[in-house]
Amino acid sequence: MASPQQIQERIIREIEQTGDPFNQFEYLLTKASQLDEMPEERKHPDVLVKDCQSQVWLYLHNEGGRPIIEADSDTLMIRGTIQILKEMFDGQTPADIIACDVNYIQRTDLAYAFDSKRVAGQVAIVKRIKDFAQTLSTT
């Protein structure tokens, strides 16, 4: 299995190969369509991510000592972001998740599509995933 960092590098290459910022945003929307729908019964207030401009439900659970991510958002671009994070982190070791510097937005033209509130939301999602990984690594 590729590490989260290796997956991120592949994603960055894919994003850059699409060309201009508009096409890179289209890539994100394509990723959004790949995200499985989160069951409605999982969408409750205690799994909402604070500090997100959009509504983001992030349900994390442990499978064999590795985090499994179920998530959804009411915004397509954030659904695309969630799908990328799911590809990077789903089923990875807690240590690999904690060590990964998530920077694909800053390293691509997607940075033009993310205002400071959206960046803060993405940071909050990553923090929740890393915090969960940290709890798994100490148990």
Image: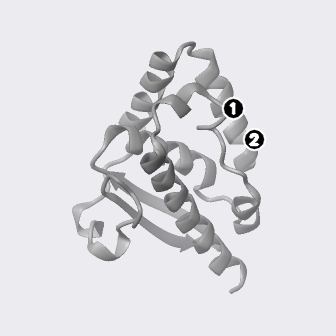
Q: Residue at x 31, y 43 (%)?
A: 75
Residue 34 percent location from the top left of the image: 41, 37
Residue 100 percent location from the top left of the image: 73, 54
Q: Are there few (<14), some (14-19), or many (20+) residues within 10 Å of tag 1?
A: few
- Most distant residue in the top direction: 19
- Most distant residue in the front direction: 116
Residue 55 percent location from the top left of the image: 30, 57
Height in image: 75 above or below 127? Answer: above
The residue beneath circle 2 is: 6
The numbered dot on residue 10 is 1
- Most distant residue in the bottom direction: 139
Q: Residue at x 57, y 64 (%)?
A: 127
Q: Residue at x 62, y 48 (%)?
A: 88
Which quadrant holds residue 131? Answer: bottom right
Q: Amino acid at mark 1?
A: Arg
Residue 52 percent location from the top left of the image: 39, 57
Query: How far separated are the C-alphas under marks 2 and 1?
Result: 6 Å
Secondary structure beneath dot 1 equals helix
Q: Residue at x 57, y 13 (%)?
A: 19
Q: Amino acid at mark 2?
A: Gln
The answer to which of 112 and 11 lies nearer the viewer is: 112
State left or right for residue 53 relative to residue 112: left
Question: Does the residue at mark 2 contact the one at mark 1 (Cβ under 8 Å)?
Answer: yes
Name the quarter where the C terminus is drawn.
Answer: bottom right
